């Protein structure tokens, strides 16, 4: 049977040791079968197990094989579109609920790390960096908006202040969120998987779900086995393919690229990010960067619509990194990789139920480290019969991409090009 290894990323290179996890063989029975062992699947499984459910996870490759084991590692609060957009889209009650939840994912991550003693290099502090006065105004409005929902620990920074924490001349200011921060993303996923297993959950790796029999007694089929369950949670996100056609219809997988430098000396690392905060800029197609536990610079950016892997990732990302930190011109890149996230037209997540017993959450459109942890909680709540917060997310409207499956990639790329031009021109 095919064996899918991790991509050759810095995270796979520095992953904590893990046990061998067998593929599913034969028939098993459980309360909930989760498809996909990324943050969405693992977080859902953990909340369910903590509440007495029996859970089995089938994972096509390995725990954290998808975006959860490849991302920038930035704990970014709120959603890919902010609460003001949600306020305009759904009714006040749902907007209120989603506003209150906007920082909960970050708290869940910290609780998980503390409760299950997960070693994943957690650091506090995330910076949103602005190039233009329009972006600064947006950050000021965002701070007021977030504070209205009770989220504090935010500081607006002028040009002088941001240069104290991000040593580049590029930005005119920014916002520091001390409830943001960063982690080694794969080690977080691996620690959560170990927590799942410590509570009796079972994870089958190299076990892609290839068919779901729907109905009152659903069954998930893998190449060599099947799981009979009362409920199914679909958490395959950008890697799901067409397993559940209705979930593929209004989303588009997109790639983002990341590099990791060779380890930097303490002096060089401090000359870039003296406080060890992570940074993302405010452009529509944004750059994101941070230091790792062993002082490499992780630098990511770029979007490939339709998720075709670019031929030379280093050639794509290195110029972006040098624009921010020209002083790194002689530094070697040790790792370069790509990962896929799932875009929706609104850039808001899709949460819902198919029939009575198939639940899903997907499509957080680039900012998902915190949201997916929250998603696990609201999916578990819904399975326990408390669906108020699940229904709030379920009320977000979703539309197909213009151009249909044939033209959605060029149409979306054209839209992104327009927004990037606006960023460059500061309009
Ligand atoms: C390069 C990159 C950088 C990013 N940086 C950040 C960041 O810094 N901060 C942030 O907030 N967000 C970031 N994101 C987004 C974030 O990583 C994702 O939103 C989040 O990890 C999605 O988690 P998930 O569990 O829903 O999906 P995934 O982590 O992709 O997990 C899905 C899993 O399902 C499995 N699967 C799929 N189909 C099947 C099947 N049929 N059967 C069994 N298993 C299946 C896959 O193998 C995979 O392991 C980034 C994304 C990428 C790609």
Image (cartoon, grey):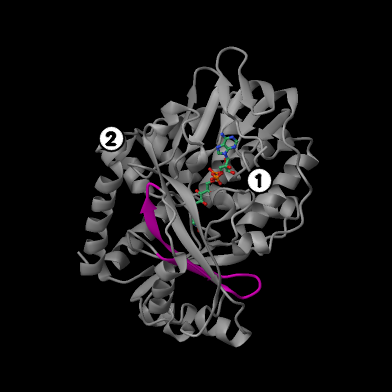
Locate residue 253, reporting x and y percent. Answer: 42, 44
- Whichever of labels 1 and 2 marks the residue nearer the N terminus, that label is 1
Instruction: For mark 2, give the secondary structure.
Output: helix
Magenta region: which residues?
Answer: 287-306
SS of the residue under disc 1 = loop
Residue drawn at point x = 26 percent, y = 48 percent: 410
Nearest to the observer: residue 190 or residue 386: 190
Residue 305 lies, in percent from the top left, at 36, 50
Which of the pair 207/172 is nearer the observer? Answer: 207
Residue 88: percent from the left, percent from the top?
29, 41
Ligand 1 contact, mark 1 (Cβ < 8 Å) = yes
Taking 23 as reference, is 140 above or below it? below
**What residue does disc 2 label?**
404
Distance between the alpha carbons at the discs numbered 1 and 2: 32 Å
Which residue position is annotated with label 1? 62
**Quick check: can you spot residue 290?**
yes
């Amino acid at each position: 049977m095919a064996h899918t290894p991790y991509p050759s990323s810095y995270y796979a290179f520095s992953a904590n040791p893990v046990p061998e996890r067998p593929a599913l063989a034969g028939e098993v029975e459980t309360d909930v079968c989760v498809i996909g062992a990324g943050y969405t699947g693992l977080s859902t499984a953990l909340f369910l197990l903590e509440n007495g459910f029996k859970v089995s996870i089938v994972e096509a490759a390995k725990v954290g094989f998808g975006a959860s084991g490849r991302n920038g590692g930035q704990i970014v609060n709120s959603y890919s579109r902010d609460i003001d957009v949600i306020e305009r889209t759904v009714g006040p009650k749902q907007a209120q609920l989603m506003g209150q939840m906007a920082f909960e994912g970050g708290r869940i991550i910290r609780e998980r790390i503390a409760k299950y003693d997960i070693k994943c290099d957690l650091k506090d502090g995330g910076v949103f960096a602005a190039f233009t006065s329009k972006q600064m105004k947006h950050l000021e409005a965002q701070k007021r908006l977030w504070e209205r929902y009770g989220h504090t620990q935010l500081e607006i920074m002028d040009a002088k202040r941001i240069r104290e924490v991000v040593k580049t001349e590029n930005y005119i200011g920014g916002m520091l969120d001390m409830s943001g921060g960063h982690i080694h993303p794969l080690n977080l996923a691996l620690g959560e998987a170990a927590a799942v297993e410590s509570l009796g959950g079972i994870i089958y790796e190299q076990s892609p779900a290839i068919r779901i029999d729907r109905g009152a007694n659903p069954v998930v089929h893998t190449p060599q086995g099947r799981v009979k369950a009362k409920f199914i949670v679909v958490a395959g996100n950008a890697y799901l393919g067409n397993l559940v056609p209705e979930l593929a219809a209004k989303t588009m997988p997109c790639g983002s690229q990341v590099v990791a430098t060779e380890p930097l000396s303490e002096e060089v690392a401090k000359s870039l990010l003296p406080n060890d905060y992570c940074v993302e800029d405010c452009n529509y197609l944004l750059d994101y960067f941070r230091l790792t536990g062993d002082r490499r610079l992780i630098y990511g950016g770029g979007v490939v619509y339709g998720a075709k892997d670019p031929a030379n990732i280093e050639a794509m990302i290195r110029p972006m990194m040098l624009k921010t930190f020209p002083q790194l011109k002689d530094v070697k890149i040790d790792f370069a990789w790509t990962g896929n996230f799932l875009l929706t037209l609104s850039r808001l997540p899709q949460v819902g139920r198919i029939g009575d017993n198939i639940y899903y959450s997907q499509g957080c459109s680039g900012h998902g480290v915190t949201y997916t942890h929250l998603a696990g909680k609201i999916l578990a709540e819904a399975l326990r019969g408390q669906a108020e917060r699940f229904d709030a997310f379920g009320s977000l409207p979703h539309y197909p991409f213009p151009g249909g499956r044939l033209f959605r990639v060029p149409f979306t790329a054209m839209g992104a090009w327009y927004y990037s031009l606006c960023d460059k021109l500061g309009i």
